[in-house]
Amino acid sequence: MELYELTLQQLIKELESKRTNAQAIMTAVMGRINEVDGKVQAFLTLNQTAAMEKAAEFDRQPWPGVIAGIPFAVKDNYCTRGVKTTCASKMLEDFIPPYDAAVVEKLHGAGGILAGKLNMDEFAMGCSTETSAFFPSHNPWDLERVPGGSSGGAAAAVAADEIPLALVSDTGGSARQPASYCGVVGLKPTYGRVSRRGIVAYASSLDQAGIISKDVADAALVLGIIAGHDPRDSTSEKKEVPDYSTVLTTDIKGLKIGYPREYFQQAEGNVGTAVKKALLEFEKMGAIVEEVSLPHSEYALPAYYIIGPAEASSNMGRFDGIRYGQRDNSAENVAELISGSRQRGFGPEVKRRIILGTYVLSSGKYEKYYLQALKVRRLIRDDFTGVFNDYDVIIAPTTPNTAFKIGENASDLITSYRSDIFTVPVNMAGLPAISVPCGLVGGLPVGMQIIAKPFAETTLLNTAYAFEQATDHHQLKPDLGVR
Amino acid sequence: MSKEFETVIGLEVHAELKTDTKIFCGCKTAFGAEPNTQICPLCSGFPGALPVLNKKVVELSIKTGLALNAEIAAHCQFDRKNYFYPDLPSAYQVSQLFLPICLNGYLDIEAEGEKKRIRINRAHMEEDAGKLIHEGTITTTSFSLVDLNRAGVPLLEIVSEPDMRSAQEARIYLEKLRSILLFAQVSDARMEEGSIRCDANVSVRRRGEEKLGVRTEIKNLNSFKALERAIEYEARRHREVIEDGGTLIQETRTWDDEKGITRSMRSKEEAEDYRYFPDLDIPPIYIDPAWVEEIKKTLPEMPEQAQQRLRDDYDLPEYDAAIITATPYSLQFFDRCVALYPEAKTVSNWMMGELSRLLNQHNMEIQQCLIAPDMLADLLKLIDDGTISGKMAKNVFEEMFASGNSPARIIKEQGMVQITDEDVLGEIIAGVIQNNPGVVDDYKSGKEKARGFLVGQVMKATKGQANPAAVQKILKDLLN
Amino acid sequence: MMMDVKEIEHLAILARIALSPEDKTELNQQMNKLLTYIEKLKELNTAAIEPLYHILPLHNVFREDLAIESPPREELLFNAPQCEDGFYKVPRIL
């Protein structure tokens, strides 16, 4: 096996046993990127020179850390000190932040080496990575299809073995949906489990850091590194961080699993079948699998498209061309400067969401739309709380479909948005969830989503791990036609 | 204001809270730093930055609420006020609309001999914006410069009910409010530095009418005087519009101090819609009664308590007590002086008289001048023991004010010690008598004025240093 | 509740985006589609439900009033498209 094909844990073992070194790993990774990224287009910025230097430095004088010497990549809405952070937008095409995101600090602290920045939907607004201002990314399983969004670059890169680990954000499914489309693992921790500091905000009450990895054990390892209280993020929780890796077990006898009928009713036939088949695996392992109901499910997406854009319309106000970013220098006065810079800098989807968000918060509309959406949010959250009284986890498909073709949904917004119908409710309720591959349909990956109670990532990871170890879906790799 | 119309005024006061750091980040709040040297990614609106609330801001706000007799909310939160302006880096101001920290307070003022209670609707925490500098004025400049040092400095916005009925009342309210803020030690409240700012809401209505008239907001009031003038101007303007049969527009206007008028600030754009919604980066604040009690204990003596104390302990008249307690600095001066020289009324007279005159002349506040309380006490003792006359003391006091030297030193250096020595005076008086035989005859024949003339001559000969009482006595003796 | 182009223009002013005429027409159509979709929420009777603002039960998250050294001015001004003497520079306000 090539170094770039290995999982994070395997790479750590290779390094520890001195069967390889950091430079060899970095060279293999960079080599793979150069080989396939022309087709996949996962990366926006490659930190090649600096990363190779750091790898050489490590080999000369290794530093400690759980992922010491190992390359990682982050979605381009993570601020990285000294490295361009564009959010896949013209607005920030030359922006170089003077600070690292909290998660990046932690990964550096664990000894990792930043290999590059990954493509995404512009400002994380989208379901396919097609709204990137630069270029779409391609699904390694079928290059004419989307890798999902908004973390499409990350999922594609991990699926194509370009990088063993990617850090992303998840506001409505942006880690899980692309993971599902690309056949990799996508984890969204509980809201507040990981610091949001330094991740360019889309919707403050929904955003959370996410992990995309090749398998569940990798995700558990990385969660252990990045989770924990940050005194500089007022919405980060103080709860203790378990050692997720060491508590990982495949024993899930007696685990109570609920599968929501409303989700299966909305899934495409073969996707639903694939996930139902996966549920049989759980029964084999001694779990109790029963149908449950999340009655307000169908209202989650419309409520999300009020709350998300509302918060975004405010968070995006700072992009005015004055202190950084795209600037319209032809402007004669400040109002023109701001309006012109924003017109130039923002793509159509971002503008749409800002306008919609402005509308639902405006005088006379606030109660009818925004407050109403927050009430619906409570109903959705309470649906989950009700089920979790009697069940440990909820399992459903991650997406109602498999990856669609690039350009297929260009004219139909709602259809595109609907690829998130199973992931959005989870963000609304602030719950932890993970997507793991559970087979192929028509040659395209299907993802199974496991949802757990707040701060029950251990149960979540065990459930996922047990399934993964009992099957071999996670070992399937796309054939990119290179070798 | 005419007999027909009544002016209705409410004031919105922004007070900078006295903290070392900003409300949501650890940047310093010190005034006067080089531009953009007290900023960080949060207060300059960089992507990914998140706010963390400064506990002291909450404490000082609770303290202020207590000093203003307000209810402290058990639950309050922050909201975003969204609008675009170059001094607002994130394009929203974090403020409190829905659930402010203080409600329903009041303070009492005295205007034209009448006591009046001005109600305070609310006080809420918010962040300040940065500063804009224009080349010339905002209308003539071709560009503006932005300094974000002030962005994020904590403010407490105190909103009164429209209970004031004259520009004078408004001014007195603001002075009283400022005094309370100083006594509570929550703000430096200096108008020149902008650590206290005031906007006035003005409307008029026919006397007897209950409904409020259209109100306009006046901004850019940079002094107490400007506040009074602007309110008087605006009230008159309203009245004139109504009398002419016109319509008043509810709008924001700016005070042009030079021209003495208000001007509309309405831009060509449409009315702003701030789209307030809760700031979800900041968890809510729950304030329990125990915390409020703790803070109540730290509240220092307030002006009204101090006034009562001065009247009770020193029998000081109400008028004096009010003036002495105008600021905590003058109260402190008084207390320290009286501790050394117990004649409270004398101290008060000197503070309200000579000291006040010199401070006004030099546009200074008492805490900035060179005279310390013990120095005044010393001076008063020197008058009492006859070392200097009351008249000379005024000169010495002026010199103390100018140099900061002690009275003893000044008197010594300038040879100002009063002459009381009977032999010395006797000689001089004898000389005066000898040189003014005609006047002496006048005096002997009963003309009192003549004696005054002789005394004057003695004072002239001694450069005013002769002790008047001694002169009178010796003169009398020598002439009889 | 459908929007017209005038409403789009008003929103564009509030949001400070200089939309082109084509943008406005397109956005108008899209907004109406989205609003129709969102209307679905009307089906729910939420009169007795409290809005859910904060998803976590966190409250009273504070920091002490201790100063932190600001980064050197160049670090933050580095990304500024226009600055002068340490200030950010903008064209006239009015």
Image (cartoon, coloured by chain):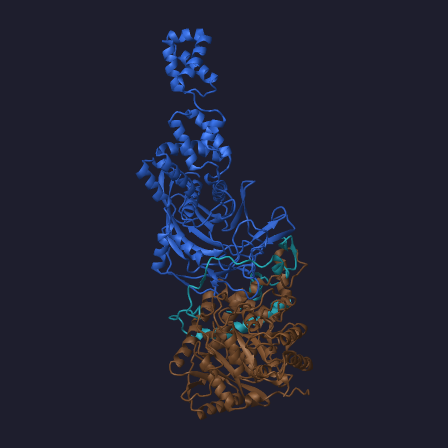
Point 31% across, 38% down: residue: B313
Tag count in the figure? 0
Q: Quadrant of the C terminus of chain B?
A: top left
Letter of the cyan chain: C
Towards the viewer: C77 or B406: B406
Q: Position of residue B466 (x, y in %)?
A: 43, 19
Figure check: B381 above or below A164: above
Q: Position of residue B429 (x, y in %)?
A: 43, 13
Q: Position of residue A338 (x, y in %)?
A: 61, 60
Residue C38: tell me if it is visible: no
Res A7 → quadrant: bottom right
Letter of the brown chain: A
Figure check: A114 above or below A448: above
Towards the viewer: B295 or B259: B295
Residue A350: tell me if it is visible: yes
Q: Quadrant of the N terminus of chain B?
A: top left
Figure check: A148 above or below B461: below
Point 61% across, 46% down: residue: B137
Colour in which chain B is drawn: blue
Which residue in the rendered view is the most extreme toward the left?
Answer: B312
Figure check: A424 above or below B424: below
Towards the viewer: A354 or C6: A354
Point 37% across, 27% down: residue: B384
Towards the viewer: A318 or A226: A226
Q: Position of residue B155 (x, y in %)?
A: 47, 53
